[in-house]
Image: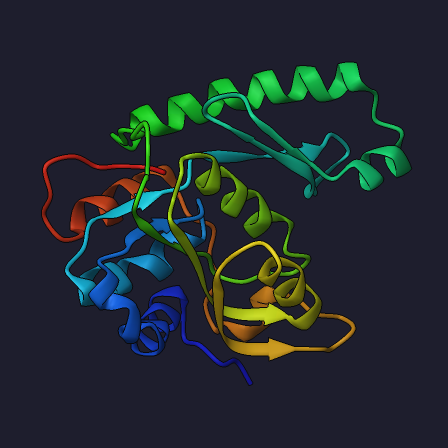
Amino acid sequence: MAWFKNREDAGKQLAGRLSNIQSEAPVILAVPRGGVPVALPIASAFNAPLGVVPMRKLSVPWLQDVAIGYVTNQGDLHLDQPLIGQLRITPQEVHRMSKKEELLLLEDLKHWKIIVPSTLSQKTALIIDDGMHSGWTMFSAVETVRKLGAKRIIVGIPVSHFRAKRFVGHHCDDIISLVTEDVALFEIANYYEDFPEISDDRIRSMLRAGPPHSDQTAA
């Protein structure tokens, strides 16, 4: 039986668990794409703007669902070097992939009407996604936000494998997971009744639906 009806339902449940940090006025940042519908109810509950972490997945060319890392809007790379070595992907291939995905990310941010701030100094950052399998996505998000100088980094997640939670927990100040599992064949989608792909148009509409603010922002 699924724990959540959909990502929005997960976000509403997560908002209740995160209410104790509302007094810190955190910057709420969703990991694109699946983190956006989870983060929207939290932003609404906190009456805070909703932004995104500006990063994009680098997929294995012949296994699009498998990530070897992430690239940010500044071209910074967070790479799973052991996996890259195992798959024998050359540095030249990584460079080519990262440049392509960086350009696509910049197009996404423009299409979503996102403005990326130069700093998060003295801010608490609350990073939201729809689940953690290996933890690599969230680790990359945490490192992206850390580079912008966030004073405190908190991760909120509806469901996580316990190894991913332990891994990410070493790199952030706090982590809240509604469901933490240790099953061998762990799949995030199994915890949702409805788990659709998230389109560009839906992301734009969700960002517009957030609490009013002068500019859409990303980490």
Left or right of residue 34, residue 139 in this image:
right
Q: Residue at the spot x=67%, y=72% of the render?
A: 162
Between 192 and 25, the one lying in front of the other is 25
Q: Residue at the spot x=51%, y=47% of the render?
A: 142
Counting the numbered discs, the total is 0
Q: Quadrant of residue 166?
A: bottom right
Measuring from the top left, give residue 126's x and y in whole percent: 37, 56
Q: Residue at the spot x=82%, y=41% of the render?
A: 83
Coloration of the structure image: rainbow
Between 64 and 53, the one lying in front of the other is 53
Direction bottom: furthest residue: 1
Residue 51 position (above or below residue 175): above
Residue 9 position (above or below residue 50): below
Measuring from the top left, give residue 135's x and y in whole percent: 63, 56
Measuring from the top left, give residue 140's x and y in whole percent: 57, 43
Q: Which quadrant: the N terminus?
A: bottom right
Residue 80 position (above or below residue 111): below
Left or right of residue 113, residue 146 in this image:
right
Residue 164 position (above or below residue 119): below
Between 134 and 59, the one lying in front of the other is 134
Q: Which quadrant: the C terminus?
A: top left
Q: Residue at the spot x=36%, y=42% of the render?
A: 52
Q: Quadrant of residue 170?
A: bottom right
Measuring from the top left, give residue 32's x and y in whole percent: 44, 44
